[in-house]
Image (cartoon, helix red, strand yellow):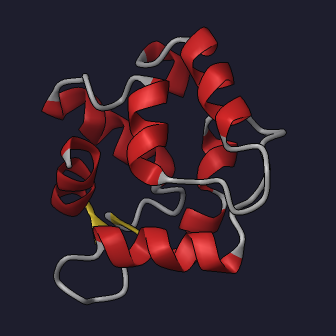
């Protein structure tokens, strides 16, 4: 499955353009702009599975830093501050990673 099976290329391009500058990533605005906020729980789960590159059932910090590149390979990596803020926002149980339920809650926040 590809991310463009769920989200449109136009929305992905617009969302990535909005976070092209260093320190500009805000997950809520990104999820809205890319169209993920309006997707069903099942569709959000499918996106989570794409983001979970090692298929561990969690998105860890190293996967989060490459978050934007899952949408388009030439997108920038998140910097350390953006990655840590994103992880902190999504890691509701404090285990240092984001599970599918945490990701779904983050998308709908």
Vertical placement of 17 versus 10: above or below?
below
Q: Residue at x 77, y 39 (%)?
A: 73
Quadrant of res 32: top left
Q: Residue at x 44, y 40 (%)?
A: 29
Residue 15: x percent and y percent?
59, 30
Residue 100: x percent and y percent?
23, 56
Quadrant of res 75: top right
Numbered-mark total:
0
Vertical placement of 59 versus 5: above or below?
below
Residue in front for this viewpoint, 74 or 38: 38
Residue in front for this viewpoint, 87 or 46: 87
Residue in front for this viewpoint, 23 or 45: 23
Quadrant of res 83: bottom right
Q: Is residue 37 visible?
A: yes
**Residue lying furthest bottom:** 95
**Apparent side of residue 102 relative to residue 47 in the rendered image (left or right):** left
Q: Is residue 60 visible?
A: no
**Apparent side of residue 34 relative to residue 12 in the rendered image (left or right):** left
Q: Residue at x 59, y 54 (%)?
A: 25
Vertical placement of 106 versus 4: above or below?
below
Residue 81: x percent and y percent?
62, 78
């Amino acid at each position: 499955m590809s991310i463009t099976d769920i989200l449109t290329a136009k929305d992905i391009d617009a969302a990535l353009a909005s976070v092209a500058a260093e320190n500009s990533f805000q997950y809520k605005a990104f999820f809205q702009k890319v169209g993920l906020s309006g997707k069903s729980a099942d569709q959000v789960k499918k996106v989570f599975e794409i983001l979970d590159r090692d298929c561990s059932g969690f998105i860890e910090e190293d996967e989060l830093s490459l978050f934007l590149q899952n949408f388009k390979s030439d997108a920038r990596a998140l910097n350390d501050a953006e990655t840590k803020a994103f992880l902190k926002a999504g890691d509701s149980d404090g285990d240092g990673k984001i599970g599918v339920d945490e990701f779904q809650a983050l998308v709908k926040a």
